[in-house]
Image: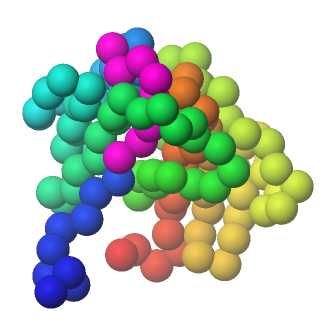
Amino acid sequence: MLGERRVHAILPTTDVESLRTFYEGTLGLTPFAIAPGVVLYRAGMGTIFGISRSGGQASGAHTQVAFTVPDVEAEVAELQARGVVFEAYEMPKTVNGVATMPAGRAAWFKDPAGNLLGLIEFSDPI
C-alpha cells in the first residue's frame, strides 16, 4: 500500500511566481515540472517537493521540509552569503544559526511565504 509509494511535500504560497525566485535564484533549485499554480523540484536521491498556490498559510512553527547536508555550517555560510537569514531558537539552542541535537546538527530558515525549511547533518549518515 502506501508504504511502497514515494512521498513528497508541498509548500503553500499565495504567489507561486514570486516564491520561485527564492527557490530557484537563492537556493539554486531547478524546476522539473511546472503546471498552473504548482512548481515541482527534484532534490537529491530522487526526492521531490513542490510549491503550490494555496489559500492556507504556512505557520512556520515546525519544519516542513528538511535537506540532509554533509556539513551544516558550510551550507549555512553559503546560504547566508545569498541573503538567507537563519532562525535563532532557545530550544534547541542555536549558536550562529546551528543547533546540536542527539541526531546531529541542524539549522532552520523561512522562505518568503513563511514555510520553515531545515538543514540537517546527521551524526550517523543515513
Q: 72 and 58: which one is in front?
A: 58
Query: Looking at the image, which residue is at 18% across and 23% down?
Result: 36
**Can you say whether 67 is above or below 60 in the image?**
below
**Can you say whether 37 is above or below 96 in the image?**
above
Given the current orientation, which residue lies at the most extreme right position?
Answer: 90
Total marks drawn?
A: 0
Given the current orientation, which residue lies at the most extreme front position?
Answer: 55
Q: Is residue 115 inside the magenta stretch?
A: no
Residue 74 visible somewhere in the drawing: no
Query: Looking at the image, which residue is at 51% across and 18% down?
Result: 82
Locate residue 38 relative to residue 95 in the image: left or right. left
The structure's colour scheme is: rainbow
Residue 67: horizontal and vertical position, in percent? 42, 52
Locate residue 116 relative to residue 61 in the image: left or right. left
Residue 40: horizontal and vertical position, in percent? 21, 37
Q: Which residues are magenta?
A: 10-17
The image quadrant that residue 51 belongs to is top left
Query: Looking at the image, which residue is at 41% across and 58% down?
Result: 68
The image quadrant that residue 84 belongs to is top right
Residue 118: horizontal and vertical position, in percent? 54, 50
**Can you say whether 55 is above or below 103 in the image?**
above
Residue 48 visible somewhere in the drawing: yes
Locate residue 95 relative to residue 120 in the image: left or right. right
The image quadrant that residue 125 belongs to is bottom left
Quadrant the C terminus occupies: bottom left
Residue 1: horizontal and vertical position, in percent? 15, 86
Query: Looking at the image, which residue is at 11% across and 33% down?
Result: 33
